[in-house]
Amino acid sequence: MYKNNTLLRRLGLAMGLVAASTLASANQAEKPNFLLIIADDLGYSDIGAFGGEIETPSLDALANEGIRMTNFHTAPTCSPTRSMLFSGTDNHRAGIGNMAELLTPEQKGQPGYEGHLNDLVVTLPEVLRDNGYHTSTTGKWHLGRTEALSPNARGFDESWVLVQGGASHFDDGRAIIGVDPKAIYLENGKQVEVPKGFFSSDFYADKAIEYVNAAGDKPFFHVLSFTAPHWPLQAPDSYIRKYEGRYDEGYEAIRQQRLGKMKDMGLVGHELAANVPFDQLPTWDELTDEQRRIEARKMEIYAAMVDNMDENIGRVIDHLEKAGKLDNTVVMFMSDNGADGNSPEVLPRNKEWIASEYDNSFENMGRRDSYVWYGAQWGQVSATPWPMWKGYPTQGGFLVPAILSLPGKNANGEINHEFFHVMDIMPTFLELAGIDVPTTPYKGREVFEVQGISMVPGLNGNAPENRVVGWELYGRSAVRMGDWKIRLMEPPYGPGQWQLFNLAVDPTETTDLASKEPEKLKQLLAEWDKYVKRNGVIAADPADMRRVGYSFTTCLYGKCVE
């Protein structure tokens, strides 16, 4: 576990949050290290530092000395987020205009829709490596399946990664989609098998420590990209037992407990109520005793995965401390998108595959030969207080927990409510390292400009006003300008036309102001048109995406949102 003495030592070094140029000039000989930790499908309120009941002492300690960013945005799903993180530009420019698995015929072969991180962007690890850093990553990649598209081809010196969107967390080597059942792992671009006794979070943390050690005297950039707590929900028995009975009270009780804690912590306003938009799904009281027993067990396994991930984060941070590197390491933690309330059985061939090859009996849930997920109602609890979940341009879909800890700065648990975006990580890290943001051409090749902006001004209370950012995925779209947001989602998840929200007074998106504020709607629609043109967006037809199946059907015990 991340120890309190580390906090005290950093407090002794505290010099306030300074511009990166000052930080770099004060320590020219020793550039800062970077440890970027990514959780997969973790919900906004799951960890203790963001109001959750799951035991996460390592992340809580990081938050207690660092900065909690309550308004940090990603894409609605994982690979678009990762493309923006590594490129600093929009996913439609970086090659993941749509997830590779879900490209429509109109999108295939088009610029920005290559289905992998393309050569039209320069990556953060490339720039850092070109400036003397040792670069490495472990865990989920999901930005290209071949050696030519592996992390080692995009700026990483060392890597051990899963190339698909998810897989079994144990050593059976199964992927998560019936049409692609074999998990593919690459070590430095070459395909490898997982070792016997593999458990994803444990192994990725081990490799992270190995790669940090391999940096030697060089400054390091390491991306520790967990596949937890992405389904299938699996964890060692000892962690699952720890949470037995913890969720017997059900969805609404846990949601209200989390919301109350979030208010007490100052993460959200005391007047805020959680937005749970769908009343078509069964409540806890409407479930049978056996259904409640199964639902509680699913959340117990999910909590066990988060708990185990936190323990492994603590192992890595403790190692940095013992190695004398932590005091000069920027540590950032984030989730890659909102909580996942979707149902994996709607993926092609998955329902038959799950039924025929897995044992999902109550006694076996969470073990290596089970395949379960926690579904829409627990997903909405994880997203507390925001509406909906992964796959949607709602606050619950792309507003994620994020923590930043800076060398020489004890922020004493500061809470920052400024708007930040995953594209901002690249320019922020480069500024902290004293490295210029790349321009085109870069090393002889034309590349798109970095669209993200450094977070340093926003962390100092000088965030730009009325910043404009857009999103599109699966034909679902959004634009945000300052506190105003427009959103487009197809029925039954939206009205099929643009909605308008004022997040300053309605952060959970409950009141559509499109008819009352026509000029504001017109203004944001003009920004949408600019976004489409700037990024070459080929918006999918939601009707076509519905036929693909993923993130388009929400059901629980026979009741569906429709």
Image: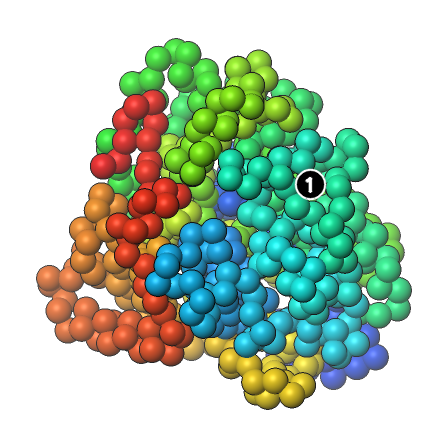
**Quarter holding residue 482:** bottom left
Q: Which residue is mark 1?
A: 201
Q: Would you say 132 lies left or right of 488 here?
A: right
Q: Tell me residue 540's x, y (percent).
A: 32, 59
Q: Tell me residue 72's x, y (percent).
A: 47, 60
Q: Residue at x 42, y 63 (%)?
A: 108
Viewer-proximal residue, 257 or 166?
Answer: 166
Q: Would you say 469 lies left or right of 368 here?
A: left
Q: Is 163 situated above or below 90? A: above
Q: Callout 1: few (<14), some (14-19), or many (20+) C-alpha neighbours within 10 Å?
A: many
Q: Residue at x 67, y 64 (%)?
A: 148
**Quarter holding residue 85:** bottom right
From this viewpoint, is residue 504 visible? no
Q: Residue at x 23, y 71 (%)?
A: 525
Quarter of the figure with the C terminus? top left
Q: Secondary structure at mark 1?
A: helix
